[in-house]
Image: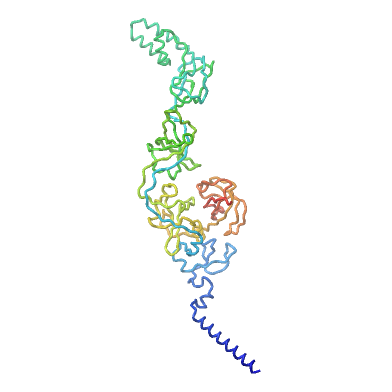
Amino acid sequence: MSARILQGVLLTGLALVLGGLGGYWLAKQPGEPLQDRAAPPGSSQGEVLYWYDPMYPQQKFDQPGKSPFMDMQLVPRYADEAGDSAAVSIDASVTQNLGMRLATVTRERLASSLEVVGNLTFNSRDVAVVQARSGGFVERVYPLAPDDRVAAGAPLADLLVPDWAQAQEEFLALRGVADAQLLAAARQRLRLSGMPAGLIARLERSGQVQTLWTVTSPIAGVLQRLDVRAGMTLAAGQPLATINGLASVWLDAAVPEAQAQGLAPGQAVEARLPALPGEVLAGRIDSILPQADLDSRTVRVRVELDNADGRLRPGLTAQARLTRPAEQDALLVPSEAVIRTGRRALVMLAEDGGRYRPVEVRLGRENGEQTQILEGLQEGQQVVASGQFLLDSEASLRGLLAPDLDAAATPVMAPALHEAEGRVIAIDDTELTLAHGPFKTLGMPGMTMSFPLAEPALAQGIATGDRVRVGARESDAGLRIERLVKLEEQP
């Protein structure tokens, strides 16, 4: 019995020793106070300024509760969050998880060349129209058809012109008269009747009345029209044929309107044609047409190319490099960093402390993967080049807008931007029909419906069947699409 009592005493003592050591170890460990570990998230964020619905951040409430707009609780806005209401704060770990990439605003020499595509056309200034000089009859038409190539002086048709016969007989009768003035007057009458100089010279050489006139091509080129047939009766001035010269051709190139700045007639151009591999043709800008294409948002540039050897055929495609004066000290950012809303262009400016601010910019020329910034940024600043779409969405949910460049305004609260993905069913400049997934922030299920577009420019580059991500805001007319991004097809 005494052995059992001794064993119990030893076990009790061992437990007391281990308990004391454990308490000592816990007391030595660094860590947060108990109240800090048990405090709910956000309880130390300071004074609550107001409550709001993230879907309608412009509406403020004095007390917490349920949102009158959506089936959700109001969210508090703390005092330390309102220090800069025009910026979004993102934790560094979240930034890394999003794969966000920054780019520095640089000042460099903007490249002076531009690659565009186009096609060859006839030179519309090199055209000859052949007409009947006087009324007559078609005796013969030479074997030609539209689109045939003809040489200068090639015969087209033989015409019988009875009205010339009497004038020729009078001229021949006066040849034996010594009065030079009468002979000159008779020759002038032949000219005024429409006889060509070559036919008058033949009359003087042969001394015989020329009843047939062989109509010939005045230039070398392509026979565009042949409006004459054997046996036809012709009136004075009636068109017989149209010939388009091939000594030079035009290259009509479509230049994006944002890149047409700096182009001018006379600038050098290099052209390459798939039909002439390995050859580089030199040309110059002949003119820049005054009207832009509304559908493609391009400006037509007309380039003149020499075609003395006749190898260039209208209708061939070509790639042209347009050379324009270099621009010094251009402020550049990656083109992918620019967010185009259709109404204006924005970038997400990275600031210290993980803050990102939407900034409106004015865009200049684009060259490859870089875009010129005319106003809104400074050299050395950093902008978000990847992941800015998510930041802009967060800024929209918080009701933040970039200050307008045209007005010195304080940050403006805006309606929320609601996003969804879907496939384009139909699209034009004013409306998009979309088979979309749910708009989660609106509680709207997936369906197929039509949405108005805020700007026609949003439809550029989007076609029926494309997968897209849309951003829409509520307006008096319902949801209106203000952002439209084409997505890559999933394998």
What is the basis of the colouring in this image? rainbow
Rendered position, 301 above or below 242: below
Q: State the residue lying farthest toward the right.
A: 1
Q: Quadrant of the N terminus?
A: bottom right
Image spot of residue 160 (x, y percent): 49, 13
Q: State the residue lying farthest toward the top.
A: 176
State the residue at coordinates (43%, 65%): 353
Q: Nearer the viewer, residue 143 or 224?
A: 143
In the picture provided, is 269 more to the left or to the right than 395?
left
State the residue at coordinates (53%, 65%): 52
State the residue at coordinates (48%, 63%): 90
Image spot of residue 37 (x, y percent): 52, 75
Q: Nearer the viewer, residue 434 or 149?
A: 149
Rendered position, 487 above or below 174: below
Residue 400 in view of the camera: yes
Marks counted in the figure total 0
Image spot of residue 298 (x, y percent): 47, 42
Q: State the residue lying farthest toward the bottom.
A: 2
Q: Quadrant of residue 305?
A: top left
Rendered position, 166 above or below 107: above
Image spot of residue 379 (x, y percent): 37, 55
Residue 86 in view of the camera: no
Q: Nearer the viewer, residue 233 or 277?
A: 277
